[in-house]
Image (cartoon, grey):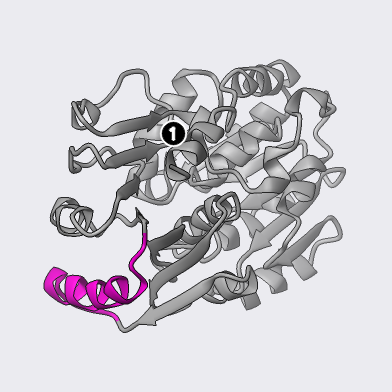
C-alpha cells in the first residue's frame, strides 16, 4: 500500500505535526511519502533520516496553489491513503483530495469543521469532557481521546505504573517546544536562581530556538543547570525528571505516559482549552497563556507544586488513568484495510 502524509514544520508552526506523523508512519507497512513545504527552520530532514520519501514544495500563498502543487505529486504517487495533519488545510482541501484516494485520515486537535464521508476518518487525541459539535459525524470514522494518541515507540512501550515516584523534587525538566517562538525557555533560565540549589534543571531546546546563545549564557552561570539541544532521548530525560515545566503541546501525552507531573504555560491558542480541561481533571497544573503570567506567578506555583508531593502524585495517577495510546492499534487497522 501507498501512504502520503501532508504536514509542515517551521519556527512558527513548531515540530509536533511532523513528529507525530513520523510516529504513525513507523507503524505502517508500505510505501511512505511525505509532502512538506520548505519553511524557515523546518525539520524535514527528520523524515529522510527515518527512511521515508520526502517531496519538498515551495511555500504557496493560496489554497488554489496548494491544491495544484500537491495534486500533481499525488497524481504521480497514486496513494491508497492520504493523511493530513495541518491547521491551515481545512474542509475545502479535504473535499478535493478525498475523491482522489481510497481513505483520508485527518489528524486534528482543535475541533474544526471537517468532511463527513465514508472514506474519511478523524483522529483527535485531545482530552475533552464532551464531544465537540464539529465531531458529531454520521459517516466518518472517529478516533477521539488520548487512548488514540500517536506516541513514538520509546514512549509507547513504557509502563507508566512501573516508574518510581519521588516525594522530593530533585530534577526539573523545562521544554517549550523545538522552536519556542515566545522565548519561554530563556525566561525560565533567568529565574532558576530563585529556587533551591539542591534542584537540578534540564532545559531542552530545538536547534531552531532563536535564543540558544542567551539560554546557554544564563545556564553557564549556574552550577545546577544544563541545556540539551535536539535530543533523541526525550523519554529518558522525562524518566529521570520529577517535575516538568513547559508548554501544553504534543508532549502532553508523552508526559502522562511517563508519569511526569507538569506545570504548563500555553504558548498557542489551541493549547488553552486543552490545558484548562486537563487541570480540571487534575492531570496538570495550568498557569495560563504565556503573555498573561508573571515571573512571580511562575515562581510561586513552582514552589507550591514542589512542596506538595500529594499534588504531584495525584497528577500522575489521574494521567495514567487516561490510558494514553492504548487504542492506537484501532487506527492502524483502519489504515491497513
Q: Is residue 317 magenta?
A: no
User: In the figure, 245 relative to 35: above or below?
Assistant: above
User: In the figure, 313 relative to 246: above or below?
Assistant: above
Name the residue: 42% across, 78% down: 55
Q: Is residue 77 left or right of residue 251?
A: left
Q: Is residue 43 visible?
A: no
Residue 61 lies in quadrant = bottom left
Q: Is residue 66 magenta?
A: yes
Name the residue: 77% across, 49% down: 237
Q: Quadrant of the C terminus?
A: top left
Return the residue nearer the eye: 26 or 43: 26
Residue 336 image offset from top left, x and y in percent: 48, 44
Name the residue: 63% across, 48% down: 152
Q: Secondary structure at mark 1?
A: helix
What is the chief secondary structure element of the magenta stretch?
A: helix
Q: Is residue 193 visible?
A: yes
Name the residue: 43% across, 59% down: 3
User: In the figure, 136 relative to 229: above or below?
Assistant: above
Return the residue nearer the eye: 130 or 11: 130
* Count of numbered badges drawn on the protein: 1
Range of residues picked out in magenta: 59-79
Residue 314 image offset from top left, x and y in percent: 65, 16
Residue 97 image offset from top left, x and y in percent: 21, 59
Circle 1 Cα neighbour tier, 10 Å, few/some/many (<14 / 14–19 / ≥20): many
Residue 73 lies in quadrant = bottom left
The residue beneath circle 1 is 275
Return the residue nearer the eye: 35 or 336: 336
Q: Is residue 254 left or right of residue 61?
A: right
Amino acid at each position: 500500500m501507498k501512504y502520503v502524509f501532508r504536514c509542515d514544520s517551521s519556527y512558527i508552526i513548531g515540530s509536533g505535526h511532523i513528529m507525530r506523523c513520523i510516529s504513525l508512519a513507523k507503524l505502517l507497512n508500505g510505501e511512505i511519502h511525505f509532502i512538506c513545504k520548505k519553511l524557515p527552520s523546518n525539520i524535514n530532514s527528520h523524515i529522510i533520516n527515518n527512511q521515508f520519501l520526502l517531496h519538498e514544495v515551495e511555500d504557496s500563498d493560496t489554497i488554489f496553489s496548494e491544491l495544484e502543487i500537491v495534486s500533481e505529486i499525488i497524481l504521480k504517487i497514486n496513494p491508497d491513503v492520504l493523511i493530513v495533519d495541518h491547521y491551515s488545510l481545512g474542509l475545502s482541501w479535504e473535499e478535493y483530495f478525498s475523491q482522489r484516494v481510497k481513505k483520508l485520515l485527518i489528524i486534528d486537535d482543535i475541533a474544526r469543521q471537517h468532511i463527513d464521508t465514508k472514506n474519511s476518518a478523524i483522529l483527535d487525541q485531545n482530552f475533552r469532557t464532551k464531544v465537540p459539535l464539529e465531531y458529531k459525524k454520521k459517516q466518518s470514522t472517529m478516533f477521539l481521546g488520548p487512548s488514540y494518541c500517536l506516541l513514538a515507540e520509546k514512549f509507547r512501550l513504557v509502563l507508566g505504573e512501573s516508574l518510581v515516584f519521588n516525594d522530593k523534587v530533585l530534577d526539573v525538566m523545562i521544554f517549550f517546544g523545538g522552536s519556542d517562538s515566545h522565548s519561554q525557555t530563556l525566561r525560565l533560565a533567568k529565574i532558576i536562581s530563585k529556587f533551591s540549589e539542591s534542584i537540578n534543571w534540564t532545559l531542552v531546546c530545538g536547534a531552531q530556538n532563536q535564543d540558544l546563545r542567551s539560554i546557554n549564557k544564563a545556564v553557564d552561570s549556574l552550577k545546577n543547570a544544563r541545556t540539551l539541544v535536539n535530543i533523541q532521548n526525550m523519554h529518558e530525560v522525562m524518566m529521570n525528571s520529577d517535575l516538568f515545566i513547559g508548554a501544553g503541546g504534543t508532549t502532553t501525552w508523552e508526559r502522562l505516559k511517563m508519569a511526569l507531573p507538569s506545570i504548563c504555560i500555553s504558548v498557542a491558542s489551541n493549547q488553552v482549552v486543552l490545558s484548562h480541561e486537563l487541570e480540571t481533571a487534575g492531570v496538570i497544573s495550568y498557569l495560563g497563556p504565556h503573555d498573561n503570567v508573571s515571573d512571580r506567578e511562575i515562581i510561586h506555583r513552582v514552589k507550591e507544586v514542589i512542596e506538595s508531593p500529594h499534588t504531584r502524585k495525584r497528577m500522575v495517577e489521574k494521567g495514567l488513568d487516561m490510558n494514553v495510546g492504548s487504542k492506537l492499534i484501532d487506527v492502524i487497522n483502519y489504515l491497513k484495510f
